[in-house]
Structure formats: C-alpha cells, structure tokens
C-alpha cells in the first residue's frame, strides 16, 4: 500500500462556486465590489474595503509578481509528499495592491523565484477540479 495521497481538492460553497467554475474553464475570476470597486480574495460575503454585500466575479489578467515565498521541505503535507521540497508562493495580482493568492511550484524553479519576479496564472488539473496556480515568466 502506498503512502502517497492525492492532492487536496477545493470545496466550493455558495460564495466561492463562481471562482471554481471559472477555474474549470481555465479563467481567473476574482470577486469585486460593485459599490467601491475593491477586489476581494478569497471570496466572501462582504467587501473588505466598504462592507457592501454586492460582490460579483470579474475576469482578471492573471499577471502579478511574487510577494513572498518559502521552500517547503516537509514530506508529510497530504498530497505533496513526493513533491517535497517545493516552493509555496504568495502572488500579488497586478489589478490591486495586496490582492494576494497562494500557489506552489516545483523546487526545480528555485533559481527563478525571487521577491518581485513576474508570474502568470496557470491551471493544474486535479481530476474533478482545476486549481489556479502560477508560474514564473
């Protein structure tokens, strides 16, 4: 019996379902407030900036820069046992300061990863789900 587990799959709820549906179509859609124009991620029921509740999903460019990263050597993260070490990224999307998303990269990308490096969205097929990821450009 193998100790390798499948990577976790997202669990969509009423608020996040449009984000995951767009990802299945390989489109990056981020929730945006109709009242003030502020982008909210992860999806939620109210705007972080003005607390309005009129939020809609809009397409974004999928371009950004590495805001932060760490190299993970842990081999007990479910679904990532065989990929360690790997790189966890925090990406700041170009649409708005501090519009952050989390991603991961294989350690083979280590030489290309630096704070401020340009990235673009990519999508990882995980069987029943598609997960937005990023790659260094």
Image: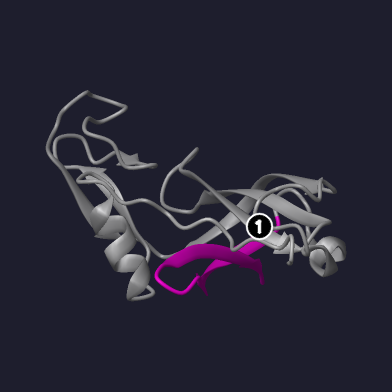
Secondary structure at badge 1 equals strand
The residues colored magenta run 117-137
> Residue drawn at (66%, 57%), measured in percent from left and top?
104
Q: Residues within 10 Å of mark 1 (few under 14, many from 20)?
A: some
Taking 28 as reference, is 68 left or right? right
Please, what is the dominant secondary structure of the magenta stretch? strand
Locate residue 2: give its quadrant.
Answer: bottom right
Q: Residue at x 19, y 46 (%)?
A: 14
Magenta stretch encompasses residue 130: yes
**Which residue is rendered at x = 80% and y = 47% of the image?**
72
Q: Position of residue 46 (x, y in %)?
A: 22, 30
Identify the residue at image location x=70%, y=58%. Answer: 80
Count of labels in the image: 1
The scheme the figure's colours follow is one colour
Q: Is residue 77 magenta?
A: no
Q: Which residue is mark 1?
A: 104
Percent coordinates x, y for residue 18 in the rendering:
24, 57
| Residue 14 seen by the camera | yes
């Amino acid at each position: 019996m193998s100790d390798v587990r499948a990577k976790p799959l997202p669990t969509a709820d009423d608020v996040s379902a449009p984000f995951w549906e767009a990802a299945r179509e390989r489109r990056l859609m981020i929730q945006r407030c109709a009242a003030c124009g502020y982008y909210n991620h992860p999806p939620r029921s109210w705007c972080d900036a003005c607390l309005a509740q009129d939020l809609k999903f809009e397409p974004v460019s999928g371009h950004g820069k590495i805001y932060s990263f760490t190299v993970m050597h842990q081999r007990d993260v479910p679904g990532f046992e065989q990929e360690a070490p790997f790189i966890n990224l925090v990406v700041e999307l170009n649409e708005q300061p501090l519009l952050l998303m989390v991603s991961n990269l294989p350690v083979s990308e280590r030489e290309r990863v630096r704070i401020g490096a340009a990235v673009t969205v990519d999508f990882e097929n995980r069987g029943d789900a598609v997960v937005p990821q990023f790659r260094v450009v």
